Image (tube, rainbow, N blue to C red):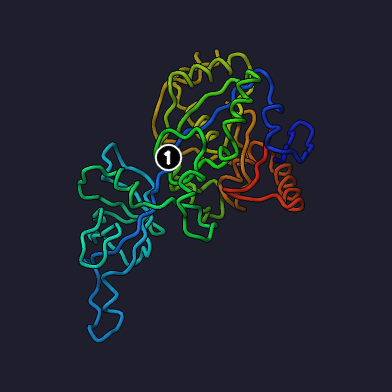
Amino acid sequence: MLHLDRSTGQITDRQFREFPDLLRSGDLVVFNNTRVFPARLYGRRAGIQAQTVSARNPAARKFLPGRVEVLLTKQISQDPNEWECLVRPGRKIGVGERIILGEGGLGEAGELEAEVTARGDYGARRLRFAPSQDFFATVEKIGHIPLPPYISRDDSPADRERYQTVYAQERGSVAAPTAGLHFSTEILARLRERGIETAEITLHVGLGTFQPVRVERVEEHKIHSERYSISVDAAEKLNRALTDSRRVIAIGTTTVRTLEYAATQYGGKLGKEFGIRFGASSGEANLFIYPGYKFQVVSGLLTNFHLPESTLLMLVCALGGQELVLHAYQHAVAQRYRFYSYGDCMFVE
């Protein structure tokens, strides 16, 4: 674990087991308890909207059973049958196409069937699934863990537990809040032993995690919205910490986005003057944090090392200071830290 002290600019190489001892007695540590589900599905297209392929073309025999990959990125509503997805090969799958998902072969019934109802940019599609007895149970059966694109291997059964935090509860993410992967039951027990207060919120990580910045002016980038919820208990803990001027330490960038967005949604100016920024709430968070942002809630952050030019790295730079964070990244490269989801972490305070 790399430790970056913003007040001094000091960079220290540590072990993650030291993290509880770096915290202050009044700190409130906030976790994102979302749970990753096997949201990557494989199947075939039915070919309803496909162009005719000549029977004399050898490819004709492979056209209809062509493999399709669907990544469920966001449930549209409480109805589990409506989803925003990423689809491959996107350019060949138009509106009206039916997709058969599951392990069945050509001519056999798939486990799930969906129709493409709308299309978006970069392979995004809206799918309506045919009613099934238990949609999520079927997804758990036939789905695959959606490992990040820079992990160039198929998922394995071990990833169902390995790509999951030990405190994960609320199903709904297509990517893990990876800073939380470092925690074990022993580390959590150490926090309790030291009397460190903790709270849990939920942000279901969706398409925004995979969306690169494609604009020249960072201010023009539009981040995708993601579902969040904050309980009464978490809101009360957050309000007390802010009222008492205690530090709020976020575990992961997803926690930062949730807390900072939710704080902007509280309507009472008088309440804010007394530190009451939170109430029990849920909704869609779409806050894009980049250098120049003024933090209202978060004082410290535990985070993994992120991809260059990503919105996640921009968020870390906004909190830690761009020059300091990039210097810390140079140090991490020189010291052979491991980057990305299954890599090492950095504590910025």
Q: Is residue 69 left or right of residue 238?
A: left
Q: x%, y% of residue 145?
A: 43, 50
Residue drawn at x 67%, y 28% is 20
Q: Is residue 102 left or right of residue 4?
A: left
Q: x%, y% of residue 315?
A: 59, 41
What's under tag 1, amino acid-wise?
A: Glu
Q: x%, y% of residue 247?
A: 64, 23
The C terminus lies in quadrant: top right
Residue drawn at x 39%, y 40% is 172
Front residue (pair 220, 321) = 321
Q: x%, y% of residue 221?
A: 50, 48
Residue carrying label 1: 226
Front residue (pair 86, 189) = 189
Query: Vertically, is 57 above or below 136?
Result: below
The N terminus lies in quadrant: top right
Q: Quadrant of residue 99?
A: bottom left
Count of numbered tags: 1
Q: Is residue 135 left or right of residue 147?
A: left
Disc 1 element: strand
Q: Quadrant of residue 256?
A: top right
Residue drawn at x 24%, y 61% is 97
Q: Quadrant of residue 60?
A: bottom left
Within-10-Å neighbours for mark 1: few <14, some 14–19, many 20+: many
Residue furthest out toward the bottom: 56
Front residue (pair 156, 180) = 156
Residue drawn at x 63%, y 40% is 316
